[in-house]
């Protein structure tokens, strides 16, 4: 039997319905699949975007101070290497977080 809360009722009855809903065996699975995982993905995406913006800021500062073409090429090469390295590190970190959540849910 599935319990759906009716928030139009008195607070005590609503609290009892929420308790029954929380005891539902699928509630934890639903929370993990539709709340925890998307929030972890969003947090990871924001971390990656922030690091990317920092790297880009550093790159633009370096390019602004370049006086020769070899300096410009070096700055661009460093930027690309750092960006791809950050993406690899953040992807590994995200996969580790997801793996830990899955192992925790399975335990």
Image: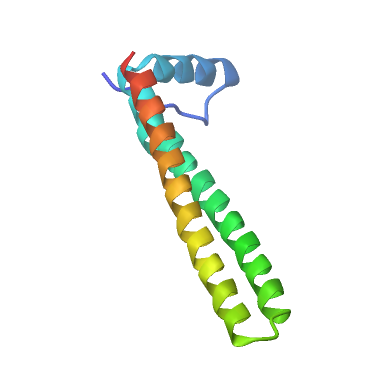
- How many numbered marks have been drawn onto this rendered protein structure? 0
Coloured how?
rainbow
Q: Residue at x 48, y 39 (%)?
A: 40
Determine the image quadrant of residue 3. top left
Q: Position of residue 61 (x, y in %)?
A: 71, 73
Q: Position of residue 54 (x, y in %)?
A: 65, 60
Tell me if residue 62 comes above or below residue 6 in the rendering. Answer: below
Left or right of 9 on screen, residue 88: left
Q: Position of residue 72 (x, y in %)?
A: 60, 80
The answer to whether one can see residue 4 in this image is: no
Q: Residue at x 44, y 26 (%)?
A: 5
Q: Quadrant of the C terminus?
A: top left
Tell me if residue 81 comes above or below residue 6 in the rendering. Answer: below
* Nearer to me, 38 or 18: 38
* Nearer to me, 2 or 52: 52
Q: Position of residue 59 (x, y in %)?
A: 63, 70
* Nearer to me, 102 or 59: 59
Residue most extreme to the left: 1
The answer to whether one can see residue 45 in this image is: yes
Left or right of 12 on screen, residue 18: left
Q: Quadrant of the N terminus?
A: top left
Q: Residue at x 54, y 79 (%)?
A: 73
Q: Residue at x 41, y 41 (%)?
A: 92
Left or right of 69 on screen, residue 96: left
């Amino acid at each position: 039997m599935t319990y759906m809360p009716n928030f139009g009722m008195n607070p005590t009855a609503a609290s009892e319905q929420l308790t029954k809903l929380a005891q539902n065996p699928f509630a934890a699975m639903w929370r993990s699949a539709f709340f925890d995982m998307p929030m972890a993905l969003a947090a990871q995406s924001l971390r990656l975007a922030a690091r990317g913006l920092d790297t880009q800021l550093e790159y633009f500062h370096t390019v602004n101070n370049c006086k020769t073409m070899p300096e410009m090429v070096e700055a661009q090469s460093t930027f690309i290497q750092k960006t791809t390295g950050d993406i690899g590190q953040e992807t590994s970190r995200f996969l580790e977080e997801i793996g830990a959540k899955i192992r925790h849910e399975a335990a």
